[in-house]
Image (cartoon, rainbow, N blue to C red):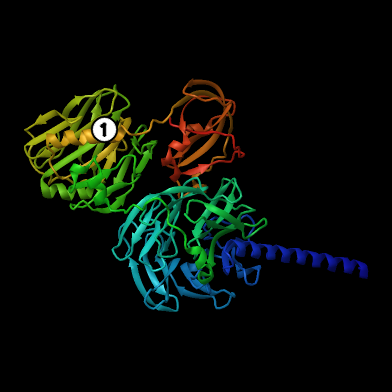
């Protein structure tokens, strides 16, 4: 039996614990109010209540919905778990929370945890916007799962719904998206990993880059950001898509962070983490609230909202607009916004000025990592990302490197097909740099082609041994291989242009081949897919670089060919040289490599290895140790470098990572201990 002294000690201990918790809550409230300059703030998030279970986006039946309010200054349970809940977010007025639950039902619950009801079924909740006319709030949902149509529903009148984006229209198949306050713009993935901003009325979108977790600003400024593959940084864009710059979003240093999300206020965002290089359940994963600086160039301050050995994820914050107006007047970036109108891009560019207005396909090397398709007026009608096969990738200038693989664009060939059939003319323009000049055997190694699902090809540019060939189907004629010229190890500007009775090949602006025996139109063309590099299953893989691609439906003259060659040569002469480093090095440590099922939807993985430098064979490097970024997974397959054993000496060909911006879209594994003195390089071998 406990004595009164024992009971007093227990009561005193509980009181101290309670006082400590109260002080912690008071400190959190004070920190948030200080950061928001007194604005009433609410935060909602998911917390796993089942040991060992949970993923960053939710979806599993293991969560409670948690919340914090600066008015009552305490963390509390909004909806008790374990329940199935995904991506909770606050309404624009801050009075309710939306979440997606069991049976694809979208719920709304009051901030006090009462009146939890289903708004709609067979859907996934995305975001809300406010009707500028009646000031009523609409809920946006994806109907019938990933790839379905987007519907908006009046929260207080669920029978009132409208189709925002029909199923199958353009590329809208994302589950991570947000709208501007007025609902005229949406920012998201179209589809992953291509990210950008859509205009809801016109049903068209503009690609800004590659990544994930992409959102537009909550007001009507149309700013936009998305996360990149290392899950440590986001890329921020000015209204219209210009001024892209990277900013770190790692409040507690090392590890990966997920679910970066704009609050209801332009200047604040939330993230969750850190995840120690894994997407699995992780204790100590918490919620952070951050504030952008006035020019949106960095996150200048963080406050940790949840603390403890929990698995907290998928957070969203509401910040009272009236109180925070004085801090919402953020100065626009000094960098001038660039309007995303491709027709202007065509007209202003020296490189492909001559192809407007009949450019059907453009790959603007070194500027955008997105393929572009245009209509006959020269206006972009849709963004087509390049999908890679095997070891193919973009290099530091966004040049297609087909060594060990190839690229393709689904659907792009259909636009070429239609336009060329109508005009009866065709031109292909590109730069190639062969990597191998002595191809074995009698097979052709394809450089570029237009093909369909059955493997039928409309035209093929290929290399056989050390010769360049072209083949094209015309009405009533069997395809024949036409030898063009002998290749050497240098860059070539090639134009192949055709109209019935005349086919000309221009090499570096000069005529290299002309034949008058090829006649007919393009009635037999069926291709819907542009392929760069060899098609799957070919015996010979073409190894080399492809850039400056233009396809159009216009016959090209010698004068235009020479001008295009000079313009492109001039543009690439301005490229900054990237220093190359060749070393002999011994492996000291490597990051834990994640299997595909742990990082999906990512299907490529980079990992950081650490080496001791034995010898510098070429270039300059003074350090004794070096960290190297390797491809360890391509096309869901683990590569041999991933199995390199500690102590093994290898020869490395490297470039500085900061000169390889194309890598930001891919998943990065880095479980090595942080080292501020470590210099990071990228392994460019295949």
Q: What residue sits 10% from the left and 38% below the top? A: 477
Q: Left or right of 58: which side holds 238?
A: left
Evaluate whether residue 533 shows in this view: no
Which x, y percent locates residue 527? 22, 45
Is residue 44 rendered to the left or right of residue 131? right
Q: Which image quarter holds the N terminus? A: bottom right
Q: Residue at x 36, y 57 (%)?
A: 197
Crowdedness near tag 1: few (<14), some (14–19) or many (≥20) residues, C-alpha within 10 Å: some
Residue 331 versus residue 322: which sits nearer the camera? 331
Q: Which residue is mark 1?
A: 569
Q: Position of residue 237 (x, y in %)?
A: 41, 53
- In this rendering, the answer to whether 172 lies above or below 682 is below
Residue nearer the viewer, 235 or 507: 235
Residue 295: % across, % down: 47, 54
**Number of labelled discs?**
1
- Secondary structure, mark 1, is helix
Pick whichever, 244 or 585, lies toward us.
244
Q: Say if 621 sits above or below 341 in the image.
A: above
For the C terminus, the image quarter is: top left
- The answer to whether residue 573 is above or below residue 70 is above
């Amino acid at each position: 039996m406990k004595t009164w002294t024992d009971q007093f000690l227990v009561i005193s201990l509980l009181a101290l614990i309670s006082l400590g918790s109260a002080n912690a809550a008071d400190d959190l409230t004070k920190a948030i109010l200080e950061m928001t300059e007194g604005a009433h703030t609410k935060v909602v998030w998911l917390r796993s209540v089942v040991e060992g279970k949970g993923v960053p986006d939710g979806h599993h039946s293991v969560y409670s919905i948690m919340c914090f309010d600066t008015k009552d200054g305490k963390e509390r349970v909004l909806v008790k778990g374990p329940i199935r809940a995904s991506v909770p977010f606050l309404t624009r007025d801050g009075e309710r929370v939306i979440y997606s639950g069991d049976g694809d039902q979208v719920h709304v619950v009051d901030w006090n945890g009462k009146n939890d009801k289903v708004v709609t079924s067979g859907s996934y909740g995305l975001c809300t916007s406010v009707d500028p006319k009646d000031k009523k709030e609409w809920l946006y949902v994806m109907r019938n799962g990933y790839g379905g149509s987007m519907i908006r529903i009046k929260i207080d009148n669920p029978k009132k719904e409208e189709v925002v984006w029909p199923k199958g229209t353009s590329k809208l198949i994302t589950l991570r998206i947000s709208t501007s306050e007025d609902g005229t713009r949406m920012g998201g993935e179209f589809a992953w990993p291509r990210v950008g901003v859509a205009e809801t009325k016109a049903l068209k979108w503009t690609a800004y880059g590659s990544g994930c977790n992409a959102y537009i600003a909550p007001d009507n400024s149309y700013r936009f950001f998305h996360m990149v593959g290392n899950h440590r940084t986001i890329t921020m864009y000015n209204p219209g898509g210009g001024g892209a710059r990277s900013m770190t979003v790692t409040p507690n240093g090392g590890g990966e962070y997920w679910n970066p999300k704009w609050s209801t206020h332009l200047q604040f965002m939330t993230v969750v983490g850190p995840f120690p290089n894994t997407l699995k359940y992780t204790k100590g994963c918490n919620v952070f609230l951050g504030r952008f600086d006035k020019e949106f160039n960095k996150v200048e301050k963080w406050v940790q909202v949840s603390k403890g050995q929990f698995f907290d994820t998928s957070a969203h914050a509401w910040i009272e607009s009236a109180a925070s107006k004085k801090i919402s007047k953020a100065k626009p970036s000094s960098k001038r916004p660039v309007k995303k109108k491709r027709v202007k891009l065509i007209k202003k560019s020296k490189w492909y000025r001559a192809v407007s207005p009949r450019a059907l396909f453009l790959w603007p090397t070194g500027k955008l990592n997105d393929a572009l398709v245009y209509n006959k007026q020269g206006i972009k009608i849709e963004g087509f990302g390049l999908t890679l096969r095997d070891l193919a990738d973009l290099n530091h200038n966004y040049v297609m490197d087909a060594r060990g693989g190839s690229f393709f664009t689904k659907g792009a060939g259909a636009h070429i097909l239609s336009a060329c059939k109508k005009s009866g003319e065709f031109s292909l323009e590109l730069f190639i740099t062969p990597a191998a000049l002595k191809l074995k055997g009698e097979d052709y190694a394809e450089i570029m082609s237009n093909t369909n699902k059955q493997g039928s090809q409309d035209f093929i540019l290929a290399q056989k041994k050390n010769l360049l060939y072209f083949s094209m189907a015309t009405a009533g004629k069997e395809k024949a291989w036409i030898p063009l010229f002998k290749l050497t190890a240098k860059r070539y500007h090639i134009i192949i242009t055709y109209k019935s009775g005349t086919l000309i090949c221009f090499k570096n602006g000069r005529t290299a081949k002309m034949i008058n025996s090829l006649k007919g139109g393009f009635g037999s063309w069926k291709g819907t897919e542009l392929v760069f590099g060899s098609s799957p299953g070919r015996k010979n893989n073409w190894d080399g670089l492809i850039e400056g691609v233009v396809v159009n439906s216009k016959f090209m003259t010698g004068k235009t060919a020479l001008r295009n060659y000079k313009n492109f040569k001039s543009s690439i002469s301005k490229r900054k040289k990237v220093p190359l480093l060749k070393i002999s090095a011994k492996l000291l440590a490597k990051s834990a490599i994640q299997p595909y099922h742990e990082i999906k939807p990512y299907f490529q993985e980079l990992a950081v290895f650490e080496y001791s430098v034995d010898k510098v064979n070429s270039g300059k490097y003074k350090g004794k140790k070096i960290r190297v970024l390797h491809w360890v997974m391509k096309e869901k397959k683990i590569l041999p470098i991933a199995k390199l054993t500690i102590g093994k000496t290898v020869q490395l060909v490297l470039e500085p990572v900061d000169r390889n911006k194309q890598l930001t879209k891919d998943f990065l594994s880095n479980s090595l201990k942080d080292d501020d003195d470590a210099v990071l390089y990228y392994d460019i071998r295949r």
